[in-house]
Amino acid sequence: MTATATLTYNGVTIGAGSGLEVVELEGVWETPDLRTSDVDRSRAHGQWQGIDLLGGRAITATLQANVPIDDNAWSVLQRALVATGNELPLTLQLTGFANSSQVTTDVRVRRLSVPVDTERYQFGVARVVVEWWATDPRFYDSSETSTQVQISSPTGTGLTFDVTFDLGFGGEIPSGVMNVTNFGNFDAPWVAEITGPLTDPRIEHVGLGRTLEFDGEVQSGETLRVDSATKTVTLDGASRYSWLQPGSQWFDLPPLSNQLRFAAQSGTGTGTLTFRSAWI
């Protein structure tokens, strides 16, 4: 490898002067597995186009011990990379990938190969191969982005007023509207927290034209939590998915600029959006 790679998993750092160098890394730049839903045309050439969705991602690292490593260090490495079945964060920093920033993805070990040979026992050096599996194929920025706005109910009738006027021309951003940037190259999930007192809150992605509307009351001191990754709606930990109104459409944050509006039928409160930029 000509690029510099540093990996951290389960308390072990690989690269960056650790004595273990990443000499080959597969599954980072590559496209993850795909789940396709194309259907063959009956008695005709071709297929009907379905939706392509990403599957999981295999990440395989070949590591070279470039300094002698004693038996205790080998034991620590093997314990850290044992296949437990539990997903843990894998932190990656690779020159040229994800703007060379530090990213993370949750993985579990699927395979570990530590050859038993003369180099391993006489000189303490060897090549190690470890394969991780990520059920979510996205890499996320290690740092969260969090933005908060004040929510106020509209004056006049209903929620049909247009808040998009003048936003591209240096105008003042209306109450409840936020602009956030996903610096990655793939749609990023998000978590929104809405505090009361207010009734019938809603979250709209202005650019996509998609809205999540809720029929319910958030009292003062309560928090409505909306998670786009798990498609859950909770009020102080209790499910309120039944509040989600027909016609609502879930959305993630596409790459680059996103404009969202938090609103309510009545009352005041705050809306907080938290997310991590995502790469694929």
Image (cartoon, rainbow, N blue to C red):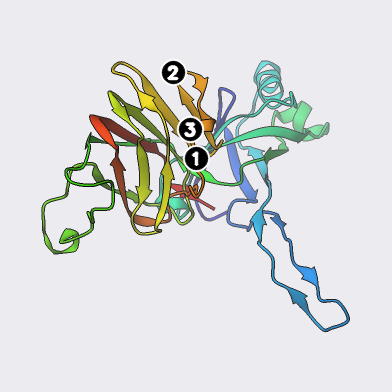
Q: Which residue is mark 1?
A: 228
Farthest-out residue, left: 171
Q: Position of residue 34 (x, y in %)?
A: 70, 57
Closer to us: 31 or 94: 31
Amino acid under disc 3: Trp
Closer to us: 121 or 255: 255
Left or right: residue 143 versus residue 84 is left
Q: Position of residue 124 (x, y in %)?
A: 70, 28
Amino acid under disc 2: Asp
Q: Quadrant of residue 176?
A: top left
Closer to us: 16 or 178: 178
Amino acid under disc 1: Ser
- Circles 3 and 1, Cβ within 8 Å, touching? The answer is no
Farthest-out residue, right: 43
Q: Position of residue 107 (x, y in %)?
A: 64, 35
Q: Which residue is mark 3?
A: 243
